[in-house]
Amino acid sequence: MQELETVIALSRTQFAATALYHYLFVPLTLGLSVLLATMETIYVISGREVYRQMTQFWSKLFAINFALGVATGLTMEFEFGTNWSTYSHFVGDIFGAPLAIEGLMAFFLESTFVGLMLFGWDKLSRGKHLLVTYMVALGSNLSALWILVANAYMQHPVGSEFNPATMRMELESFTALFFSHEAQAKFVHTSVAGFLTAAIFVIGISAFYMLRKRHMAVAVRSFRVAALFGVFASIGVICLGDALGFISGEGQPNKLVAMEGLWETAEAPAGFNVIAWPDQEAMENRFALQIPYVLTPLVTHSFDGTITGARDLVHRAEVRIRDGIPALVALETLSDNPNDRDALRTFRIHGDNLGYALLVKRYAPDVTQATPEQITQAARDTIPPVGPVFWSFRIMIAAAFLMLGFLILATIYSLRGQITEKRTFLKIAPWMIPVPFIANEAGWVVAELGRQPWTVYGQLPTWISASTHSVGYMIFSLVGFVAIYTIFIIVEMFLMVKFIRKGPDDGPLPPAEPAVAAPGHTSQWSQA
């Protein structure tokens, strides 16, 4: 059992490492593709050469990020089969469908048109090349859509039914799977977070050029387009994050209590823990700084809602574990005798809580002999690791509001034609580039670690999902993946820095154009 626990921990660590590495590339690809389409649209409408040069330059950085994003993402799909074989068997019929569609509909679409976008400038008309860029943006975001539909099933399984004859979840409604509230909210929130990432990225690099008075025509206009693009994205990501939190809070109350450090059921109006020191063993906060009356409307979107705390959720889990034990016993009987009608009848009565019975099997191989202490221990496992989820959530929120404030100022300075004069602000801008990446990584931790102890929420526990590899194999593969992915990060940084230092090919641009600036301010570069 100890070796199994070690293999599970290493499997989780490996998948977390590869996912976090991969997710460094994804948001920038999503957002930069749409930002490229925006810049090229301005070029096609206005006919001004500077916007073509902008699009071509940022396309080079997009291509670097896209290529390494593909390289880091391919291995993750194979990991489901190699390291999580029980999970793959359990939900392969469902999980595989959106991933297959992603490859056929989105990835091939995106990959095909990327080459045309990069090398087709002199071979396609303006309108046709713009269509190609739109296809790249569409493919990038469709790819995210189908992957998040698959991920949303893990968070909130819908449209499926467990078949005791095959021991698998089977898809009953593709419509329910695709249109689940979790999937749609997760997709929109993730895509808009990508738009925000790209905006900060473009602003930071444009500020770098302006500080050095290089490529000013491209830099000032890129800054303005990205600032306007980003300020709306930052507002959207905060609003959509609230909507996703509301949906997830209803479907996964255990994740919600981890995000909020909420151990006791809170009657309205509950206070919001700005900071706290959660003690999971004692199920209490050793220290908490609260803002009164904020949590209830934030979580329930009302002023009188009750928020169930971790202790009550543990008690509910104990009830579900006890109710699920007969279903697990019946399932074991059906595996030996599929025609046992009594076992089938028992399974149908208690089958909704089968996943909870599997939790206690970790501590009591014979679940019929599970002690109250073992049931309580399994029930406590349903509360995810509170400390990491709690603090990751606050890092994400703090980063979102920091970016909102930054982008509001960037937009104001840019529209007033003052941005080249705000050297302190320009010096800060490049240091903002890591902020959206940190926020995205923190959001991933909240979403995925907050789902524990489940790979499929309420249905399949993580401890039973992993393949039966040796500890040595898992250590070798973990070290190998981390080493390879670290090399990928170094390659990306090297190529990005190389092309950023080189800068855009300014070409023959018209002389500096007169500015339209706020009264009392002039700037030869402020004219859009």
Image: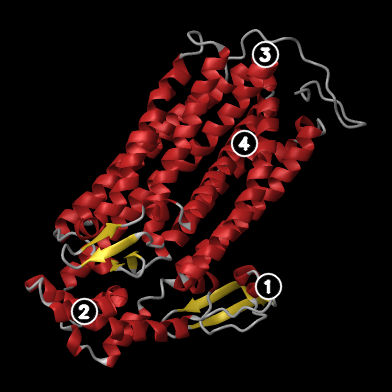
Query: Badge 4, how many Cα within 10 Å: few under 14, some, many 20+?
Result: many
Residue type at mark 4 is: Gly
Q: Is mark 4 on a helix, strand or loop?
A: helix
Residue shown at 57%/48% (left/top)?
435
Q: Marks 2 and 3, how far apart in space?
A: 71 Å
Lower position in the chain sequence, tag 2 or tag 4: 4
Q: In which quarter of the image is the N terminus?
A: bottom left
Q: Position of residue 516 (x, y in %)?
A: 85, 25
Can the viewer see residue 177? yes
Residue 471 position, x and y percent, is: 16, 60
Say whether marks 1 and 3 touch (CB < 8 Å): no
Query: Given the image, on which type of amino acid does mark 3 rest?
Result: Gly
**Residue 345 tag number:** 2
Seen at 66% across and 22% down, the residue is 42
Left or right for 135, reference 513: left
| N-terminal label among 2 and 3 | 3
* Badge 3: residue crowd in 10 Å (few <14, some 14–19, many ≥20): few
- Neighbor class of circle 2 (other Cα within 10 Å; few <14, some 14-19, many 20+) is few
Q: Is mark 3 on a helix, strand or loop?
A: loop
- Identified by mark 1, the residue type is Val
- Lower position in the chain sequence, tag 4 or tag 3: 3
Q: Which residue is the site of mark 1?
A: 294
Residue receiving disc 3? 47
Q: In which quarter of the image is the C terminus?
A: top right
Is 82 drawn above or below residue 68 in the view shown?
Answer: below
What residue sits right under mark 4 in the picture? Answer: 204
- Along the horizontal axis of the image, is 116 left or right of 439? left
x and y percentages locating residue 200 in the rendered image: 61, 40
Q: Nearer the viewer, mark 2 or mark 1?
A: 2
The Cα–Cα distance between marks 2 and 1, rounded to whole angstroms, is: 47 Å
Where is residue 419? Give x, y as percent.
76, 33
* Cα distance in 3D space between marks 1 and 3: 50 Å
